[in-house]
Image: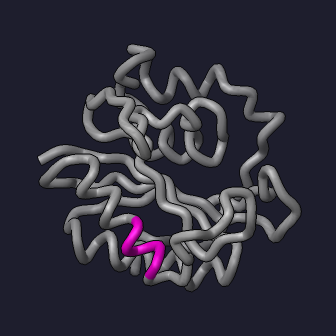
Amino acid sequence: MTLAYVSGGSNLDAEANLTHAARALRGRHPGTRFSRCYRNPAVGFEGPDFINFVAEVPVRGDPQLLKGELECIETLCGRPRAAPKWAPRAMDLDILLFGDVVQDVPGLVLPRPDLLRWAFMLGPLAELAPQLMHPTKHRTIAGLWREFDQDAHPLTVEALDLNKE
């Protein structure tokens, strides 16, 4: 069993889509846990705010298998496979970490480079797994979050609790 950490977000019918994605993740991977949900502005384009979370997902299999499952869940939530990158979306699910795997293969770089760039990924991960060691920085996620410019990237806690669904 490997613990993977997955970032999820939506800015189209967000609460319904996040709830749907959480149920699908728990159904495929019993024991999945979720951070709180956070609201933040869309990045890279004009659009409604996103609501984001990070999930700790116990996985049997490899990163490519999980990536395929996440793409299926995105599709179930109404995201077309050919959706543009910088646009509103019903669901976005990305693998941030997959155990201590370090890889750079087409379509899947681990750990995800954006993890250390975006508050909506690093903040919820620090809440969920503060003592987790980043596999290439060799620092705890909590330590990386403490050094992050949190004031420049504010997150607002949402009432949606994905652990209750």
Q: Does residue 108 appear left or right of residue 10 in this picture?
A: left
**Residue 11 at x, y percent in the picture:** 70, 71
The residue under the point 59% across, 63% down is: 9
Q: In the image, 37: left or right of 68?
A: right
Horizontal and vertical percent for residue 76? 44, 83
Magenta span: 71-75
| Total residue callouts | 0
Residue 4 lies, with reference to residue 42, above or below; the image says above
Q: Quadrant of residue 78?
A: bottom right
Q: Nearer the viewer, residue 46 or 130?
A: 46
Q: Main secondary structure of the magenta part?
A: helix
- Residue 73 falls in image quadrant: bottom left
Question: Is 72 in the magenta?
Answer: yes
**Residue pictured at 56% horizontal, 77% vertical:** 79
Q: Residue at x 37, y 47 (%)?
A: 5
Q: Quadrant of residue 88?
A: bottom right
At x 50% / y 38%, what residue is drawn? 126
> Residue 138 location, x and y as percent?
39, 14
Q: Relative to 68, does residue 129 appear above or below in the rendering? A: above
Picture quarter with the C terminus: bottom left
Q: Is residue 148 magenta?
A: no
